[in-house]
């Protein structure tokens, strides 16, 4: 076994891995042109979705209710693996208008209102939108000796509902913002199998066990099921007294075992400093070993397939009305716009390009 080297502290490596995982978590959260009214942003949540089992089975499995990660670990009976499952929990934000203004919200908190796509309040426009809460389930450290049977943990996030009054210039309540988050229930199961001396296969299965009922006639069932899905789901694994084996480029001695690993909805890659083998990210987006965030990137653009410079220039060429809608989408859209508008000429020049490595050409023999 080749132990992972420690050129960078464990906390720093974990932080580096988390930055990559966060980029995966918010990939596609909001896309250019960064406005709620754009078609792109009315069809979100396309990566790493794990839907309620009943919904998935009703759709013939086209939207999965499970995700599975299998990976190889060099180690022994004392090797310890920690598993963290992370995803986004959708929260519906509905803008509503009151037909009759009220001095205050009623005692039960919810007046009669009509849902609208956008609510104009003075110079502000409040859009119906879907926000998110980041969730993480951290399992206790596990060892082969403690997994004679699979380890299973069930988790639940309860439903929530909140109503916020929107007041007009006269102080009366003319509208509301209603935020609703549906309950989620899931299960994580971890098992391990010894393949040969010093080599183990670890399996992590994630299941969505949330109760689901079919939507009313005419409703878009996938859109209705999305708030009960685990969105952008991915798994972070960390090993102590052992080392992960790359499934992208496995050593010849482990190639057969690597090919037999069955990953569903996610692909595990090594993360951290190149050469380290103590951190693994099972991502719903195809990555290579040791993915990195470019140091020139000024911050999240929520689209890892695009180029920061191009997206930044596109944002700056938007009309004032388009920027205003982007600013009013939510806090993340507003922060992106403000950060882009504040970029200096020097920062833009850094976005223009960087040469990462220079490799000598191989000469023919």
Image (cartoon, rainbow, N blue to C red):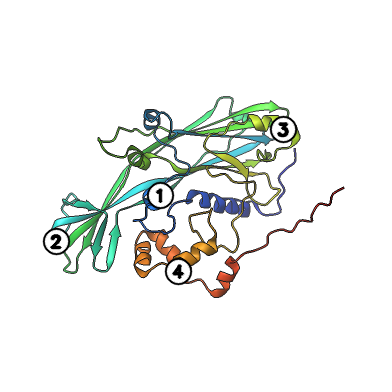
Q: Which residue is under mark 4?
A: 316
Q: Residue at x 23, y 61 (%)?
A: 166
The CA distance from mark 4 to mark 3 is: 50 Å
Q: Residue at x 37, y 55 (%)?
A: 38
Give whichever of 281, 346 is nearer the camera: 346
- Residue 200 in view: no
Q: Which residue is under mark 1?
A: 133
Mark 3 or mark 4, which is nearer the start of the sequence? 3
**Disc 1: CA contacts within 10 A as few (<14), some (14-19) or many (>=20):** few
Mark 1 or mark 3, which is nearer the start of the sequence? 1
Q: Which residue is under mark 2?
A: 103
The CA distance from mark 2 to mark 4 is: 41 Å
Give residue 254's mark.
3
Helix, strand, or loop for circle 3? helix
Q: For the residues carrying marks 3 and 1, which lies nearer the camera in this image?
A: 3
Query: Is residue 14 shown above or below 81?
Result: below
Helix, strand, or loop for circle 4? helix
Give whichever of 106, 309 is nearer the camera: 309
- Residue 185 in view: yes
> Where residue 282 sits: x, y (%)?
56, 41
Helix, strand, or loop for circle 2? loop
Q: Residue at x 23, y 56 (%)?
A: 176
């Amino acid at each position: 076994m080749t132990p992972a080297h420690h050129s960078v502290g464990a906390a720093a490596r974990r932080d580096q891995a988390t930055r990559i995982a966060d980029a995966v978590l918010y990939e596609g959260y909001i896309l250019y042109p960064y406005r709620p009214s754009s078609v792109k942003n009315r069809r979100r949540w396309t990566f790493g979705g794990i839907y309620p089992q009943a919904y998935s089975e009703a759709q013939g499995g086209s939207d999965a209710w499970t995700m599975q990660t299998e990976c190889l670990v060099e180690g022994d009976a004392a090797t310890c693996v920690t598993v963290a499952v992370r995803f986004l929990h959708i929260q519906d934000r509905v803008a509503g208008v009151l037909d009759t203004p009220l001095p205050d919200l009623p005692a039960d908190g919810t007046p009669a209102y009509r849902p609208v796509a956008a609510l104009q309040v003075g110079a502000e426009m409040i859009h119906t939108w879907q926000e998110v809460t980041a969730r993480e389930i951290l399992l206790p450290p596990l060892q082969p000796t403690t997994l004679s049977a699979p380890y299973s943990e069930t988790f639940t996030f309860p439903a929530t509902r909140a109503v916020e009054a929107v007041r007009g210039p006269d102080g009366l309540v003319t509208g509301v913002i209603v935020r609703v988050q549906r309950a989620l229930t899931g299960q994580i199961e971890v098992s391990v199998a010894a393949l040969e001396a010093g080599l183990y296969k670890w399996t992590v299965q994630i299941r969505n066990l949330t109760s689901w009922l079919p939507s009313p006639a005419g409703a878009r069932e996938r859109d209705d099921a999305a708030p009960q899905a685990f969105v952008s789901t991915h798994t972070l694994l960390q090993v102590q007294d052992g080392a992960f084996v790359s499934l992208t480029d496995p050593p010849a001695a482990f190639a057969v075992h690597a090919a037999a690993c069955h990953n569903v909805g996610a692909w595990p890659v090594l993360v951290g400093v190149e050469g380290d083998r103590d951190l693994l990210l099972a991502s719903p987006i195809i990555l290579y070993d040791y993915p990195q965030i470019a140091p020139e990137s000024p911050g999240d653009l929520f689209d890892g397939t695009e180029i920061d410079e191009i997206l930044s220039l596109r944002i700056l060429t938007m009309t004032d009305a388009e920027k205003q809608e982007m600013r009013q989408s939510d806090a993340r859209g507003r922060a992106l716009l403000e950060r882009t508008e504040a970029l200096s000429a020097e920062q833009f020049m850094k976005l223009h390009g960087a040469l990462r490595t220079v490799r000598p050409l191989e000469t023919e023999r």
